[in-house]
Image: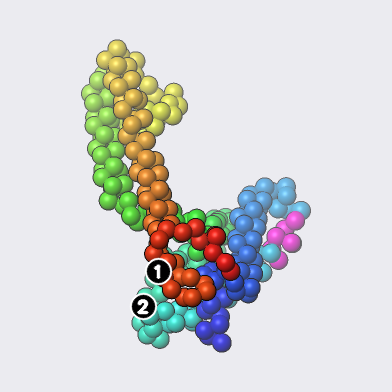
Amino acid sequence: MKQRIGEILEPESKSDFLSRGFNIFIISLIVLNIFAVSVETMEDVSDIHSGPLKVFEWFSMVVFTLEYVLRVWTCTLKPEYNNPVSGRVRYMFTPAAIIDLMVVIPFYLPFFFNLDLRFLRILRLFRLFTLFKMARYSKSLHLFKSVLKDTRQELFIVLAATMGMLVFASGVIYFIENKAQPEAFSSIPASMWWAVSTMTTVGYGDVYPVTTLGRIFGGFISILGLGTFGLPVGIIAYGFIEELQKQKMRPVECPNCGKELKAPIDRRSLPR
């Protein structure tokens, strides 16, 4: 029974009817919870439909709680968590398990602690963590996770360069504009807001240089920001191309003879 429950919980086999049905059910429940949290912020709607929303919240939290308990119970089926005690503890500290726990814990806190209703509303927003649960059930999100993992070094270098450019732009504009606008550019940290809005080319217009040198420098930073913030997009796009090529070149097993097919082949063309 433990083995079968583990197979149903893990979205791996497409031919398993129960597993596919469970995955579709959980994904639908996640989407509905995000919608419900959004509706609850509309006071006129939430007051009229408070009863059904409360029932739906109870139902969702019971399902998510049961799912979390079953995942902790069946995690020992995996070799890395095979120890009944330490294996389960390690699993509970994985990012996916922490997200699952963050979804359900705020629901049970009011039963043990006397919480302010205003604080309770904030706790309900933790149900938005269900959005991150989608990563477990979506192959596209798994692909995105693999791309981020493979390109983490390049992205870290770009992030460090961007932060350095941000500090540089804030420092230069502070020394240029401080005398002309002591309130808007009162310090380097205060000038970072201008640097962020300029480098991202958002340009809110609440803070802007008025001196000639400041405007020239602002134009230079705007052009430089286009390339700086465009680099991560290019790196991630290239990572997606590489990951997709790896998946196409990955050997597959022939469903007829069981032999490994090393040549690139379209998996969709294989007989089922």
Nearest to the observer: residue 67 or residue 268: 268
Q: Is residue 10 above or below residue 116?
A: below
Percent x, y of residue 186: 30, 28
Q: Is residue 223 above or below residue 231?
A: above
Q: For the point 49% across and 58% down, which residue is it?
A: 266
Q: For the point 62% across and 57% down, which residue is it?
A: 31
Q: Main secondary structure of the magenta part?
A: helix
User: Which structural element holds mark 1?
Assistant: loop
User: Pointer 1: residues within 10 angstroms few (<14), some, or many (20+)?
Assistant: few
Q: Residue 94, which numbered label?
A: 1
Percent x, y of residue 63: 61, 72
Percent x, y of residue 48: 76, 53
Q: How is the image coloured?
A: rainbow
Q: Left or right: where does residue 145 sit relative to residue 140?
A: left
Magenta-highlighted residues: 49-55
- Point out the frontmost of discs 1 and 2: 2
Q: Residue 80, which numbered label?
A: 2
User: Pointer 2: residues within 10 angstroms few (<14), some, or many (20+)?
Assistant: few
Q: Is residue 186 above or below residue 3?
A: above
Kindly identify the amino acid type of the residue bearing the numbered disc 1.
Thr
Whole-angstrom CA distance, mark 1 to mark 2, is 12 Å
Of the 4 image quadrants, the one containing the C terminus is bottom right
Percent x, y of residue 43: 69, 48
Figure quadrant of residue 176: top left
User: Which structural element holds mark 2?
Assistant: helix
